[in-house]
Image: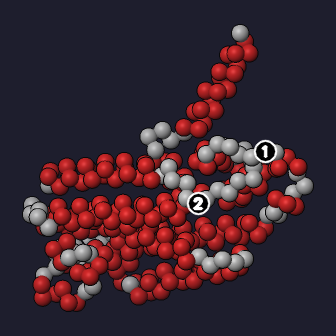
């Protein structure tokens, strides 16, 4: 058990370092592509370790195939799926793009309907079939599942770890798609910059990073600084995009990146330091 814990810890440290570098990428498509490739390499390392590792007992084996592997694999599935969605997104008006996102959302519903029994097992955190679902496949059962096809090789597979990873990934994908849909709906409700009649938009442009602006938006939203808190992130983001003539890509994903940083409030801390410095200078 300790050997596996050490390996997973080192793997996570490597992953954190790689994702920190990838998160500096401004292009959202490039970011998802690099993240997908990063998780693929991580999974290959995980496979190389496990096929040569002897589990101490069945509990450790279940732990791996139920809790460890599906987390890494779900990240690969999710990022790869989002990448494909972004690449294949049609060019057209909001209604066309809205239909496109809704079709992908329906695909998730179809997947749910086809796997309701195991969804229930997962959602209720049941355990009575763990020794069947989450141990290495016996040779005589391998033809009954597609695990060997999707999990790189049978020695790295149980009958249901890939399905579990798909469910975890689809939960995130559903959230991603609904956020994209809601963003389009809010954009349709809010007038375009050209109709705002504010000449300042031509001279005031956001010149800091998008991450800094997202950090500010979330801080203002959390502080209920607009409408006494009666607005949401999508609406606030659209407003800032218009006022500062900037396009904010994937605000929810970037906020997740902010939460995973070592210094989570980098921009807010910088604002405070700059203001305090200005106050000190004025007193001198």
Residue drawn at 21 percent across, 66 percent down: 47
Judge whether residue 212 can be spotted in this image.
Answer: yes
Residue 49's spot in the image, x, y percent?
A: 17, 61
Asked whether the residues under the numbered discs 2 and 1 touch, taking CB atoms below 8 Å apart as contact, a structural biologist would say no
Quadrant where the N terminus sits is bottom left
The label shown at residue 204 is 1
Residue drawn at 26 percent across, 71 percent down: 127
The total of numbered circles placed on residues is 2
Q: Quadrant of residue 138?
A: bottom left
**In the structure shown, which secondary structural element does the residue marked by tag 2 occupy?**
loop
The label shown at residue 250 is 2
Judge whether residue 228 can be spotted in this image.
Answer: no
Residue farthest top in this picture: 284
Residue 61's spot in the image, x, y percent?
A: 17, 66
Quadrant where the C terminus sits is top right
Which badge, 2 or 1, comes first in the chain's sequence?
1
Q: Nearer the viewer, residue 111 or 53?
A: 53
**In the structure shown, which secondary structural element does the residue marked by tag 1 occupy?**
loop
How crowded pointer 2 is (Cα within 10 Å; few <14, some 14-19, many 20+) is rated as some
Q: Nearer the viewer, residue 95 or 217?
A: 95
């Amino acid at each position: 058990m300790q050997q596996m814990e050490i390996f997973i810890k080192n793997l996570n440290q490597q992953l954190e370092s790689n994702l920190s570098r990838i998160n500096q990428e401004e292009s959202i498509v490039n970011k998802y592509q690099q993240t997908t490739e990063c998780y693929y390499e991580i999974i290959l390392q995980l496979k190389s370790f496990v096929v040569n590792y002897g589990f101490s007992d069945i509990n450790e084996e279940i732990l791996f195939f139920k809790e460890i592997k599906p987390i890494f694999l779900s990240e690969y599935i999710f990022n790869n799926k989002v990448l494909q969605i972004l690449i294949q997104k049609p060019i057209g008006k909001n209604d066309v793009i809205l239909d496109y996102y809704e079709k992908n959302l329906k695909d998730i519903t179809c997947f749910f309907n086809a796997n309701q029994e195991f969804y229930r097992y997962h959602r209720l955190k049941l355990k009575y079939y763990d020794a069947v679902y989450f141990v290495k496949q016996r040779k005589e059962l391998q033809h009954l599942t597609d695990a060997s096809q999707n999990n790189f090789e049978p020695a790295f597979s149980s009958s249901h770890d890939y399905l579990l990873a798909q469910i975890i990934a689809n939960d995130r994908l559903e959230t991603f798609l609904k956020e994209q849909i809601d963003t389009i709906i809010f954009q349709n409700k809010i007038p375009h910059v050209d109709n705002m009649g504010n000449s300042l938009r031509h001279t005031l442009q956001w010149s800091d990073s998008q991450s800094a602006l997202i950090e500010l938006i979330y801080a203002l939203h959390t502080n209920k600084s607009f409408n006494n808190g009666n607005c949401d992130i999508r609406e606030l983001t659209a407003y800032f995009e218009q006022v500062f003539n900037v396009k904010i890509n994937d605000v929810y994903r970037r906020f997740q990146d902010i939460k995973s940083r070592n210094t989570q409030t980098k921009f807010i801390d910088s604002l405070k330091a700059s203001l305090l410095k200005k106050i000190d200078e004025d007193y001198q």
